[in-house]
Image (cartoon, rainbow, N blue to C red):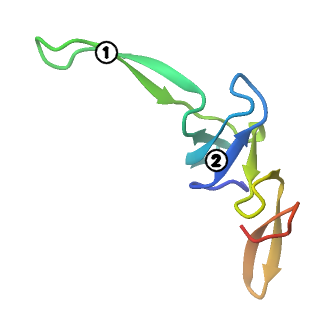
Amino acid sequence: MKIKKGDTALIISGKDRGKTGKVLDTFPEQERLVVEGVNIRKKHMKPKKSGEKGQIVEKPASFSVSNVKLICPKCGKPARVGYKVVGDKKHRICKKCQAEI
């Protein structure tokens, strides 16, 4: 998976198309990720103690990696991610500006 936790991502399809946000969590086995402020779901919570009220909590849900493009930190544009091997290390690079991510 080419997108990692902490990256800034642009949503390219779905109901939140055009929104950007920070990647909060990744699930490489399922090829899914969670982006801050995108794909918000409402969960109804029961009261835990007597006298307490129930509430509705909004939480971001995961979605497919194929719906996201990485935003390059250097050029600030959405771009595909490539790899460059330098010595024994493998680095991610922006396909538009060739900068290391």
In screen coordinates, is 78 left or right of 50? right
Query: Is 93 rendered above or below residue 67?
Result: below
Mark 2 residue element: loop
Residue 29: mark in rendering: 2
The amino acid marked with disc number 2 is: Glu
Q: Position of residue 6 (x, y in %)?
A: 57, 55
Q: Please identify the residue farthest to the right as the structure is shown.
A: 96
Q: Where is residue 32 in the image (x, y as percent from the top left)?
A: 65, 40
Q: Earlier in the sequence, mark 2 or mark 1?
A: 2
In screen coordinates, is 25 left or right of 52? right
Asked whether the beta carbons under mark 2 and mark 1 sit within 8 Å of each other, the answer is no
Query: Is 21 rendered above or below residue 18?
Result: below
Crowding at label 1, few (<14), some or many (≥20) Cα neighbours within 10 Å? few
Quadrant position of the N terminus in the picture? bottom right
Total numbered circles:
2
Question: Residue at label 1?
Answer: 55
Mark 1 residue element: strand
Q: Distance between the residues labelled 2 and 1?
A: 32 Å
Which residue is at 63% across, 54% downward? 7
Which residue is at 68% across, 27% downward? 16
Crowding at label 2, few (<14), some or many (≥20) Cα neighbours within 10 Å? few
Q: Where is residue 93 in the image (x, y as percent from the top left)?
A: 79, 67
Where, by quadrant of the figure, is residue 73 drawn? bottom right
Q: Where is residue 84 in the image (x, y as percent from the top left)?
A: 82, 74
